[in-house]
């Protein structure tokens, strides 16, 4: 017969009868039950706030009754759990659980305790079942894991997360006067990457450990040192005297790092950039103050001085981040344009060419100046795609002008090169592709580079310049007079044009010294058979004076501001028609 076919039967609801040995005998007492438990357990009563032990097993007696008489600290821990029992007895709850911590012979001990109410019946008074599970090993393991998560394995200092928790703990639990402040001092090891590259990572680790020890010697009581990055350290300092306390710590840091560190057979001097940020009050977000200190240390890396965060620096950093993000999108989706400023032959008034200048109007950021976005592009690595786009677009603009005019225009376009682009990109290949794709001759595309680009890597710059000359491209040295060029480099490099920086040109009528500098550059260029372009010509008087000095070419607002591709073509066509007539 199938189980599904069995007819249902009404049950009585009474327990099924069993043999005599199926039921536990009622003679087993409470002590036997407690002895059978592996954890500490006891039956307690509470009368007039006094706790009496009715029954207890051996683990309870060892863990609680015998423990409480050892020291004053253990007596206090015993009083804690007794107070919890008394509070539970006075309540109406049937059960409760809690954890207690106390100091043992081998360190802190932790117990998870539970209380259950045994209601009074007949002659028996109300009793309570107390059990405690030893969780010391679990807590110790959790503590060790947490320490590993919050500390740096190399230096044993707090990591960035641990640094934040240390700060929160001191702010919450320390005694702070009403006028107290705290500060963050950020430290960046300047040449750490060179040590790793030349001596290997083990030497780098040894350097970090030694620096950590020296920095730790600079701390006062209550200060916290952390390693928050690869070669970045930070100090949380309590400031009773504001900025002066921070500067005293900075001075100790400099003294601690002033003596060289011995690595293998070498002695290495550690240079660092230091930035400080101070809280305005204790309610300031510590993470925000850390970010401000890191913004200050970033400036210190450029200036070589200790930098104190000033209002607006973090906003500037956030804007640079926004610019980087939006610029990346603009390069991917054609959001930039080139503007063209004419170059004028000062003796004839003829337009000899245009300088291509990047322009950016962003839907979210509005108009962004090249003074802003070019440094961000150099810092973020976007200068390579930006420079390639400018070169290709300038060459294509010449090709479109030729098509519109019906023949090749007698003008060229100057394209600026960044020193970082020269270091990271294959510039010669870039220009070769730009010329090939546009179908124009190399003599119509001039590469403009600064003196600093040549000084950074002279050998590489020399190879690049000769490769550009193989493409028949003219080469102009931009912002001449502001760098460190010498006659030897000018004579040996294939440079065709010197561009006098606007800082010398714009005030030369009022400043005799600047006029002398311009005249000297013109004389130097003539002796080296170089042509000269003067930037920043904004008045007719300047143009006339430079013309009399024999300057070859000029550009500036006096002639025209940078203009769009279409307007630049129309500007040339009108001037060309006028000149030919």
Image: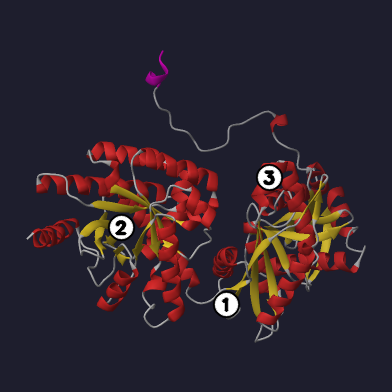
Q: What residue would you read off at disc 1?
A: 283
Quick one: label 1, few (<14), some, or many (20+) residues within 10 Å?
Answer: few
Instruction: Tell whether position 4 is magenta.
Output: yes
Q: Nearer the viewer, mark 1 or mark 2?
A: 2
Which residue appears farthest toward the left when viewing the image?
A: 581
Quick one: label 3, few (<14), some, or many (20+) residues within 10 Å?
Answer: some
Q: Nearer the viewer, residue 206 or 34?
A: 206
Q: Nearer the viewer, residue 304 or 323?
A: 304
Q: Secondary structure at mark 2?
A: strand
Q: Is residue 133 visible?
A: no
Q: CA distance from mark 1 to mark 2?
A: 45 Å
Q: Answer yes or no: do the residues labelled 1 and 2 have beta carbons within 8 Å?
A: no
Q: Which mark is residue 546?
A: none
User: Which corner quadrant of the image does residue 433 belong to?
Assistant: top left
Q: What residue would you read off at disc 2?
A: 358
Image position, residue 388 (x, y; %): 35, 46
Image position, residue 117 (x, y; %): 68, 59
Q: Nearer the viewer, residue 110 or 470?
A: 470
Q: Where does the magenta region start and end?
A: 1-6
Question: Of the residues under marks 3 and 1, which one precedes in the sequence?
Answer: 3
Residue at the image position 40 percent from the left and 27 percent from the top: 8
Image position, residue 460 (x, y; %): 51, 43
Q: CA distance from mark 3 to mark 2?
A: 38 Å
Q: What residue would you read off at disc 3?
A: 196
Q: CA distance from mark 3 to mark 1?
A: 40 Å
Q: Quadrant of the C terminus?
A: bottom left
């Amino acid at each position: 017969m199938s189980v599904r076919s069995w007819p249902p039967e009404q049950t009585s609801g009474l327990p099924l009868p069993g043999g005599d040995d199926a039921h536990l005998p009622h003679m087993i007492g409470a002590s036997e039950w407690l002895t059978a438990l592996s954890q500490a357990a006891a039956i307690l009563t509470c009368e007039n706030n006094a706790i009496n032990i009715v029954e207890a097993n051996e683990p309870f007696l060892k863990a609680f009754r015998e423990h409480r008489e050892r020291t004053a600290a253990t007596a206090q821990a015993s009083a804690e759990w007794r107070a919890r029992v008394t509070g539970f007895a006075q309540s109406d709850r049937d059960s409760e659980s809690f954890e207690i911590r106390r100091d043992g012979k081998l360190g802190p001990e932790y117990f998870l305790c539970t209380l259950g109410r045994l209601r009074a019946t007949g002659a028996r008074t109300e009793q309570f079942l107390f059990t405690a599970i030893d969780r010391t090993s679990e807590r110790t393991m959790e503590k060790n894991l947490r320490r590993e998560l919050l500390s740096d394995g190399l230096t044993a200092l707090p990591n960035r997360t641990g640094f934040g928790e240390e700060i929160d703990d001191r702010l919450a639990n320390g005694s702070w006067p009403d006028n107290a402040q705290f500060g963050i001092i950020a430290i960046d090891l300047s040449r750490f990457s060179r040590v790793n590259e030349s001596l290997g990572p083990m030497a780098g680790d040894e350097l970090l450990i030694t620096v950590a020890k020296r920095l730790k010697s600079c701390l006062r009581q209550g200060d916290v040192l952390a390693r928050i990055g690869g070669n970045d350290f930070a100090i949380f300092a309590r400031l009773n005297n504001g900025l002066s306390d921070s500067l005293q710590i900075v001075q100790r840091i400099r003294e601690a790092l002033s003596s060289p560190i011995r690595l293998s057979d070498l002695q290495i001097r550690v240079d660092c950039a230091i930035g400080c940020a101070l809280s305005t009050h204790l309610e300031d977000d510590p993470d925000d103050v850390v970010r401000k200190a890191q913004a200050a240390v970033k400036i210190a890396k450029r200036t070589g001085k200790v930098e104190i965060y000033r209002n607006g620096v973090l906003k500037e950093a956030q804007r640079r981040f926004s610019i980087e993000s939006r610029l990346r999108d603009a390069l991917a989706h054609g959001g930039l344009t080139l503007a063209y400023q004419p170059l004028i032959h000062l003796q004839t008034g003829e337009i000899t060419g245009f300088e291509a200048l990047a322009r950016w109007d962003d839907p979210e950021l509005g108009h962004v100046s090249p003074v802003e976005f070019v440094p961000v592009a150099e810092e973020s690595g976007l200068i390579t795609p930006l420079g390639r786009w400018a070169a290709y677009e300038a060459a294509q603009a010449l090709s479109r002008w030729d098509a519109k005019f019906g023949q090749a225009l007698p003008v060229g376009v100057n394209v600026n090169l960044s020193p970082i682009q020269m270091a990271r990109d294959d510039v010669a290949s870039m220009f070769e592709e730009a010329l090939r794709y546009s179908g124009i001759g190399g003599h119509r595309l001039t590469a403009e580079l600064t003196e600093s680009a040549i000084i950074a890597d002279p050998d590489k710059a020399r190879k690049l310049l000769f490769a550009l000359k193989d493409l028949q491209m003219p080469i102009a040295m931009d912002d001449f007079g502001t760098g460190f060029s010498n006659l030897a480099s000018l004579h040996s490099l294939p440079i065709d044009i010197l561009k006098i920086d606007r800082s010398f040109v714009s005030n030369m009528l009022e400043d005799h010294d600047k006029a002398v500098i311009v005249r000297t550059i013109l004389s130097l260029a003539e002796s080296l058979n170089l042509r000269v372009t003067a930037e920043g010509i904004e008045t007719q008087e300047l143009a006339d004076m430079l013309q009399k000095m024999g300057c070859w070419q000029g550009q500036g607002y006096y002639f025209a501001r940078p203009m769009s591709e279409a307007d630049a073509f129309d500007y040339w066509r009108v001037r060309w028609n006028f000149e030919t007539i």
